[in-house]
Amino acid sequence: MTGAPDHSSVDPLERVTALLEPVFSELASAPTDPVVRPSDHADAQVNGALPLAKTLGRNPREVAQGIVDSGVLDGVCSSVEIAGPGFVNLVFSGGFLSEMARRTAADERLGCAVTAAPRTVVVDYSAPNVAKEMHVGHLRSTVIGDALVRLHEFSGDTVIRENHIGDWGRPFGMLIEHLLDLGEDVAAAGLGQGDLDDFYKQANAKFADSEEFQERSRARVVALQGGDAETGALWRRLVAMSTEYFNTVYDKLGVLLTDEDLAGESMYQPGMRATIDRLETAGLMEESDGARVVFPDGFTNREGEPLPLIIQARTGGFNYATSDLTCVIDRVERLGADLLLYVVGAPQQQHLEMVFAVARMAGWLPEGIDAVHVAFGNVLGEDRKMLRSRSGDSVKLVDLLDEAVDRATALVEEKNPELDDAERQAVAAAVGIGAVKYADLSTDRVRDYVFDWDRMLSFDGNTAPYLQYAHARIRSIFRRAGLDGDSVDPQTIEVVEPAERALVLRVLATPSVIADATESQAPHRLCTHLFDLAQTFTSFYEHCPVLKADERVRASRLALCDLTARTLANGLGLLGIDAPERM
Ligand code: ARG
């Protein structure tokens, strides 16, 4: 077949919806949704006849009959049956499913359309603080944010990554003085190894003990804010030492962030004066307890009094909120963003909601430009309390990642002793890091989750190793037959057996699931779907011999195997997880 490529959806539910919509709309004399949903009794069910009958004042079963008689589903369905008060149960025809599967398999994007309305999306994620340890909250932000970046890029949006590191503020006076006390080399050695907390704690302790140190620190902040060149150079050294360390963590994690993506709080300092002027001009600024504040609508404290967002403290200093407001302006006006995603822990909800509210009042977030707090819950230890190390300190992220890879190395060694060293290391990294990421992504992000090594590294259940193994096992079918994916012909696909139908239905639902996960910032929905798909494949493989089947059937089933493997690998890739060819 030639001609223009067909961009219509491969999702059977969407196709049926498109076919039925004109029939419903004609009957109703207005655009009407046929309400096509998955069904327990059939492949799908049409629920829209009941509400339509109600508007028309007619018998619902008669309306349903009219829809069946329209014949628009002939060919697409092998059975269309009215059930109960006026539902319509659909069973898709093998020919239709085969055609959709062939199209999906022949498509590099596996049936996923590029969005018709691309957006410019800024994703604010990771955002650790200079000279402070990255904790598991930063892990969550980094992992979730990176998956959202990949999802939005895949859908055709323009994505701008911003790593809003905490690199400004009063503590930098004492941090720079401590850096000078230690000497740059000693400081660099410690910070380079990730001893960020020690550095911070030492500086803090000196600040508490010594008036002389306090004096120096205060003077240093003034010098920093005043643009003193030598202080600026020291500050840059300090920031560089920390970001170098963050980069080693990003490297281990395999995330997309680079130095180009750094957009720390310091970057917004020069713009803050203008932000304040604009708030003044808009008449939004008020005085409260000597501070300059804005009262956004709808925010009250426990006593029911209006809650202010503090823009300028009594001392004249600018706030976290001021920098975030300046940041909104920058993202919208300089970068042209129309969707701002903030992948930040749930405790900052009120701060961000107030910032968004003030930005809307000031006209910086007009209709059509959305700011979304992509909130997430805590990581808990097995005791269901905040995850802590054995010594009671917060867990260091690098230690966690190294342990993940160590544990995975042992597992991979046991599963496949034949792998050579290089491949074993690569697979162990994919499995260990994949397990940590997947554990984080696979539960609804707003909920807390328990960090459990045994569960996340299990080859059973909703885990990365299970999905990676499912993928590698399919690839091994091809290796055993001496074939590669290229020898597969998508056009050979014939969907006949129930287990083939079940598999294809799962595969065909993938584009809609990916679109939904992207739109709702809900990577866990993609995880659940991939897990379902892998399980459905297992039952297909139990019921449908592949290599031993007759030539035609074998070709079709090999194509289905390849399609499943690609769907799994693409899905894992969108989550930032590698799918090794063998394990
Ligand atoms: N650095 C902050 C923290 O560690 C997170 C910053 C989030 N982004 C923002 N635009 N406020 O909690």
Image (tube, rainbow, N blue to C red):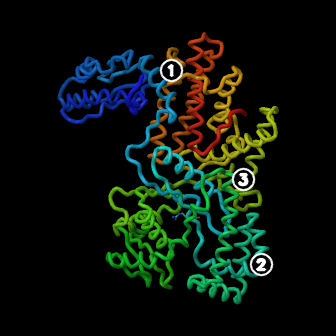
Residue at point 77% right, 78% down? 182
Q: CA distance from mark 3 to mark 1?
A: 46 Å
Q: Which quadrant would residue 332 be assigned to in this image?
A: bottom left
Q: CA distance from mark 3 to mark 2?
A: 28 Å
Q: Which quadrant would residue 66 be assigned to in this image?
A: top left
Callout 2 crowding tier (Cα within 10 Å): few <14, some 14–19, many ≥20: few
Closer to the observer: label 1 or label 2? 1
Residue flagged by tag 3: what amino acid is it? Leu
* Mark nearer the N terminus (3 vs 2): 2
Left or right: residue 15 compared with residue 442: left
Q: Nearer the viewer, residue 481 or 142?
A: 481
Residue at point 32% right, 24% down? 87
- Residue 419 % position (x, y): 79, 34
Residue flagged by tag 2: what amino acid is it? Leu
In this rendering, is residue 66 above or below 387? above
* Mark nearer the N terminus (3 vs 1): 3
- Residue 166 % position (x, y): 59, 69
Left or right: residue 408 compared with residue 83: right
Q: Nearer the viewer, residue 192 or 53?
A: 192
* Mark nearer the N terminus (1 vs 2): 2
Kindly identify which numbered label has been placed on residue 400. 3
Q: Nearer the viewer, residue 464 or 152?
A: 152
Residue at point 69% right, 49% down? 382
Mark 1 element type? helix
